[in-house]
Each structure stands twice: as C-alpha cells, then as structure tokens.
Image (cartoon, helix red, strand yellow):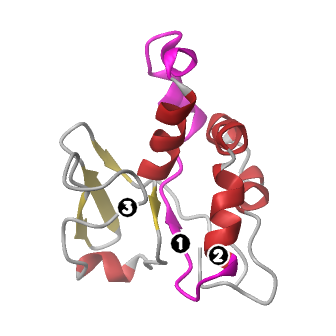
Amino acid sequence: LPAASPSPTNVTKVLEKPGHFNIFIRLLRATQEDNHLLTLLNNSNNGATIFAPTDSAFSSLKSGTLNALSDDAKSELVKFHVIPTFISSSQFQTVSNPIAIEAGSGSRVSFNVTSYGDSVNIITGLSNTSISENVVGPQ
C-alpha cells in the first residue's frame, strides 16, 4: 500500500474488493493486526507492503492448522506478511535481501525476494512462492 494519504488506508477494505483474501482478513481482525496496520499507516509516510495469502493458499494447509495456533502465533503469522514500507513492483528488482518484516526480531526466518521482469518470488526457507496479483490501496 502506498504512503498514507490524508485518511489512512483501511487494509481490510482494500483486501475485501478482490474477494479471495477472506481468511487473511479474518486473521487480521481476530489478531487486531488490522488496527496495528492502521496505526502504522497513520503514523508514517512509508506506507506498507502486505503479502496477503489467498483463501486457496490457506486451504492447502492441513485441516485445523490455523485453529491450533495460539493468538500470539496467529499475530506473528500476520506480521510475517507485512513489510513496514511500501515497495513497488519495480523496486523489488533492486531491493536488498533479506527484507525486514514486522514479525519477530533477528534472523529466525529470512525473507528474501527475487525479481525477473514482472515476476516476483518470495523465498523464506519455509516456503517459496510467487506474487500472483497486485492489489493497491488509495494513493
């Protein structure tokens, strides 16, 4: 999401429009990370980049996986998908790895991206995935 506009971006409203981020939206609300993101966007001109997993990405998890997580683990999961600055698609070609994310501290899980043309891949050591679409909030 681009840098904060006169009124901060409501992340869940932006993610509701495409219609396939429902599980991630529920996690944002349940953990109150949606409020954290609103505060981040309201108190910074850096914006944020959110790698929101689709509902189909969550459906590939073993049944009950999300319900088995503690509230803190759910919050950490959401934060793992947030970079506390806006990075445009073209900037991924020159960004320095590993990228700092909102989750935890230290190098417990490195978050690296590689970019080839319009394709951006995320490599964490736990997973290797590609960005399938860009959903951008108000600018």
Range covered by the magenta-colored residues: 42-69
Mark 2 — residue? 41
> Considering only order in the chain, which callout, 1 or 2, is on the residue closer to the N terminus?
2
Pointer 2 and pointer 1: residues touching (CB < 8 Å)?
Answer: yes
Amino acid type, label 1: Ala
Pointer 3 and pointer 2: residues touching (CB < 8 Å)?
Answer: no
Q: Callout 2 environment at 10 Å: few (<14), some (14 to 19), or many (20+)?
A: many
On whether residue 17 falls in the magenta region, the answer is no
Q: CA distance from mark 3 to mark 2?
A: 15 Å
Q: Nearer the viewer, mark 2 or mark 1?
A: 2
Residue 56 drawn at (x, y percent): 54, 30
Q: Nearer the viewer, residue 118 or 65?
A: 65
- In terms of secondary structure, where does tag 2 sit? helix
Mark 1 — residue? 48
Which image quadrant for residue 3? Answer: bottom right
Left or right relative to 8: residue 96:
left
Q: Callout 3 environment at 10 Å: few (<14), some (14 to 19), or many (20+)?
A: some
Mark 3 — residue? 101
